[in-house]
Every structure is written in C-alpha cells, then in structure tokens.
Image (cartoon, helix red, strand yellow):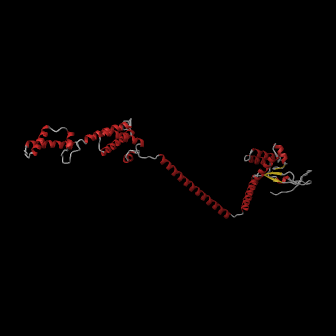
Amino acid sequence: MSKENAYSQSKNYALIKLDTYANFNSVHEMDETVKKYNKKLTKPLYETLNLLKQYSCKVVGVSHLKISTMANKLDKSISTIKRHLKYLKENGYITVVNTLREKKGGKGANAYIINTFVQRSKILSELSQMNHRKQQKSSGKTQSQRAFDLIAARKETIKSLNLLKTFIGTRKVKWASKFKRIKNIKNFRTCPEGVPDHVYSSYSPFFTDKQIEVLYDISLNKLVPFEFPREYDDQIIDKAFRTLLLKLKKEYNGMGEKVKNMFSYFAGVICRQANEFKDSIQFSNFKENGVMLNDSLIEIGPVPDWLKNRNDNQDNNDSQNNVEYDPDFEREKQEVMREVELFCSQNT
C-alpha cells in the first residue's frame, strides 16, 4: 500500500489526507468485515480492533489514535496495546501508517487502516514469501543442499535407532540369560542320599526330592522281613511307584477315588506286591529238569512215610550191593514226580 504524507490542520501534527487510505465504501461494509474478523480473534484482540473501528467512521476504515489513548479507553497497559497492534498488523488485519510532526519533529500518532479480506490475503501471501526468503538467506544453502542435509539427518537417525535397538537387544539377551540361570539355581535338584539313581531319574518328574526319599525308605522298611534278593526288591519298588502314579493319575483326571495319604497307600502296595512275589517264588528252587533240591521239600510239605522208608531201604540195599526191583514202587514214584512237575509248572 502506498504512503502519502498529506496534511491536516493541527497545532502539533503534520497534515495528512486520511480519505486516501479508505478501504470500504460504507460503514456497514466495514462492520461486517470486522465482525467476521472477530470470530478468529481472542476477546482482548477483538476489543482493540473494535476500538479502532469505532474511531474509523469519519473516514471509513481509517483511525488516527495515540497508543496512550487506546490504553485509557480499554483500561489496559501501553505494552499490552502495543502487543495487540503488532499481532493485528502481522496477521494482516490492519495496516499501520507512520506520521511525522510538522514543527517539533519526530513521530506523530499513527494511522491505523482496517484491511479488507482481499487486502489481508495479499498481505499474508507477501509475508509468507518474505519469511521463506529470510529462511533461505539465513541458511545460506540451496534447495538441493538442504535435501542432502535432510537425507543425512535421516540416515543418522536410522543409524542411532539401530544402535539403540542393538544395545537394547544385547541387554535383553543378557538379562534373559541371567534370569534363566537364577531360575535354574532356584529349581536345582539332586538325588537324595541312599536313593538309587535309576529310581530318582525315573520318578523325579512326578515327585519332589523329599517325597522320593520318604517313599524309598518306606519300601526298604517294608521289604526287610521278606529277605528277597536285591533284584526282587528293585522289581517290587518299581512296580509300587508305577501303581501309585496310576492311582494319582486317575484321581487328577476325576476317574478314581482320592488318595488320602500317599505314603500309607504306597506302603500297602509294597506289602501286597511282596506277598505276591513270595507266593510266585515258593517253588523257584526247582532245577530245569524237574529234579527238586533237598531243601525245597520243606516248602511243599513233609515227605510221605512210605516214600521215606522205601528210600531208606533202598540206600541200605545199595550199601549191601543187594538191589531188588519193585515195579509197584517205581510206578508210584513216577506218578508222584509227575504231580510235582505239574504243580511247579502251574505256579511258576
């Protein structure tokens, strides 16, 4: 907008022709414009703009006021009014025209011109271009240089993010390894003293170390009276553990009765298995050819008197080298042997 130093008659100020800055054809047009501007402003700002409008009716759209006068009218400080006028000017709502004093010299009261919508759009566009040129001048770099700087900054950012990701990943691996080691230490288990390794390795997934130790001690105490060979003890203990596991499995699956006392149940299983083994090995001392050992006769009862007397007579006759053959005795002897073999085969 062009400036003109026209003058109005006054004692202290230069004459100016305010009507040369008029932007509106009527007061109504000015009021409608300010009304729309007020919707975009805060209350303190549109109060300042409305004050300028009130003093812009003689020359529509142009006012000639001192800042101190506006401060008194709005009951605000001079610094606040200056801040409001600066905002209105920088955002294209008004244009400020500086005046000079004729006699005393120096700046006089400014003229404030309310801009139309078209003028405001043009001013904002020019201000935007000026700011853009200032930024380019301050940077001192061409558009391509700024593009390369932007790419370099992005690469540096990506590199930093990758380093951070690697660092965090390494720390996570270290912490995971540490937590796993601590967990293994907390859950460390060792075979109880006196319990065979094969028993512990087989049943440690199902029982605690203390439970295995107590169960094994119970089995040894219950098997002492039977005096079985060691291999029989191992078979009985293994079968008892398996029986207990199957019983607990049925209980946990809701298919069987609850085991009130695991250790009492285990002791009962040991005794039952031991008695079954005792019955099954009652005739285990027979030879493969069916001939009975001397001490095995005790297990099947006393020898009949007729057989015992006959054997004694035969031994005496053999000593005297006078052996007599008795067909009835041989036939009865063969029948007894067959009965013994049949009994042994049914109980092995």
Quarter of the picture containing the N terminus is: bottom right
Query: Is 94 placed above or below 266 here?
Result: below
Left or right: where 16 falls relative to 164: right
In the displayed image of the protein, which residue is found farthest to the front? 320
Residue at the spot 7% in from the left edge and 43% down from the top edge: 327
Asked whether residue 208 is in view, the answer is: no
Corner quadrant of residue 269: top left
Q: Position of residue 242 (x, y in %)?
A: 35, 43
State how many labels appear.
Answer: 0
Query: Which residue is at a point 81% across and 48% down the rendered structure image?
Result: 79
Q: Is residue 161 above or below residue 186?
A: below
Q: Is residue 41 left or right of residue 201?
A: right
- Which of the two residues, 191 or 28, is positioned nearer the viewer here? 191
Residue at the limit of the structure toward the top, as seen here: 260
Residue 213 is situated, as x and y percent measured from the top left of the image, at: 39, 42
Q: Nearer the viewer, residue 329 or 168?
A: 329
Q: Quadrant of the C terminus?
A: top left
**Above-or-below relation of 144 to 170:** below
Coordinates of residue 120 in the picture (x, y in percent): 75, 53
Q: Residue 160: x percent and y percent?
A: 61, 58
- From what the image shows, is residue 30 above or below residue 262? below
Judging depth in this view, the residue of 186 and 318 nearest the camera is: 318
Residue 205, picture quadrant: top left
Task: Answer whether residue 240 is visible to the viewer in this image.
Answer: yes
Q: Choose top left, top right, bottom left or bottom right for residue 263.
A: top left
